[in-house]
Amino acid sequence: MSTRSPRLIELDSLRGIAALIVVLHHAYLSLPDLPGWLHWTLDATPLRLIGKGRPAVIFFFVLSGFVLSRALIAQEAARPGSVLSAPGWAHYASQRALRLGLPVLASLVLSAGLQLMLWEGPLPAETPGLVGAATWSRMWSWKGFTEQALLLSSGNGYQLNPVLWSLVHEWRISLLLPFVLVFRGRLAMLMAVALVGAAIARLAGMPEGDVALGSSLLKTFAATAGFLPAFAAGAALALGRVPRLDRGQALAAGIAVLVMAMAAHDYGVILASVLLILLAQRDGPFAREMRRPSLVWLGRVSFSLYLVHMPLLAAATHLLREQDVPEVAALIAVALSFPAAALMCRWVEMPAHRLARRIRPPATRAPAGLPTGALR
């Protein structure tokens, strides 16, 4: 019997669009002296998603909470004890470590190699964006490389690939997701626990709606707690009965998503993310658009795209530093990110998934009334 829940390609497409938004956001940040109307457009309209970038990451967290919880629910239903047990959790954690860890390691190897080839020193202090402040500001060391590969850096420690700050929280909270199954029928309690996490982040001095990483390893755990509501919202959606929106509700949800795309706070983005997931599961025009082959492909390479674009942006910026053409560097980096993501997806991400699936699951008890052999 299969333990997998049916894959929703519409959600993959949404993930791909979110990854593209992050790529465009970082390219935008690398450009100086942009016209005022463009700044206004990327700050006061739904295109604020590109101007800020953070909403796309919050969407990743909500979607991860939904997709992972949905898969865990299906697995536990088919093989009781395969999730809610110590061996089951260890099996899940080892699979997650391979699926996340190998692509992360590959992105760091890529960035480290490009820096060795192209780095001639830090960029001028006035260089805008993450390329100037948080990427390749110093030559990497093996100690720093190891800390980044293990997701143990803090502050601006992810010099080789700044986007790894989000993987710190993704990794930690994904390890907790099997425990959300005990909250079935108690979703209010699940959200209450998650909001306590948000309170911890606030009491630790994390700016409201601007939590990333703390200045020390200990503070990064407080920052992780601040993202619990996003994952919990997705998990609650998976645990509860997903409502099917009628045409009027879908229209209202679409308008709400556009308005909340301009929201300055994470909670508005979390709500918009939930609505997007609901819209994607309704067989209407929006879902049909999400099934376009180009978007499905983008969703397939989204994780690799997220990981490779910053090393390429840093490489292009350093390669053309003497020419002072940041627009060209950004264009080259964005253009190269797609084939690079396709290659990384094929040669790193997919093999990591296959390797993770080869880890044997623990022995579990059969559901009442079924012989053990019925589960094989």
Image (cartoon, rainbow, N blue to C red):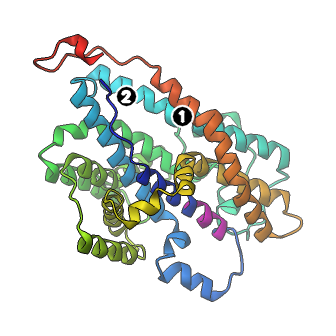
Which of 165/81 is in front? 81
- Circle 2: element type: helix
Q: Position of residue 215 (x, y in %)?
A: 50, 53
The image quadrant of residue 1 is top left
Give the residue number, with chain letter if any, for mark 1. 101
Which of 119/189 is in front? 189
Q: Quadrant of the C terminus?
A: top left
Which of the numbered marks, if any, corresponds to residue 34?
Answer: none
Main SS of residues in magenta: helix
Res. 230 in view: yes
Label 2 crowding class (10 Å Cα cut-off): few <14, some 14-19, many 20+?
Answer: many
Which of 138/323 is in front? 323
Which of 102/12 is in front? 12
- Residue 25 is one of the magenta-drawn residues: yes
Q: Position of residue 46 (x, y in %)?
A: 46, 77
Which segment is the magenta one? 22-28
- Residue 48 is one of the magenta-drawn residues: no
- Circle 1: element type: helix
Using the numbered discs, state the Cα–Cα distance from disc 2 to disc 1 in whole angstroms. 14 Å
Q: Tell me the amino acid under the disc marked 1.
A: Gly
Give the residue number, with chain letter if any, for mark 2. 92
Q: Judge left or right: residue 324 versus residue 225.
A: right
Q: Judge left or right: residue 27 versus residue 281.
A: right
| Residue appearing at x 53%, y 56% in the figure | 295
Q: Tell me the amino acid under the disc marked 2.
A: Tyr
The image quadrant of residue 367 is top left
| Residue appearing at x 81%, y 57% in the figure | 318
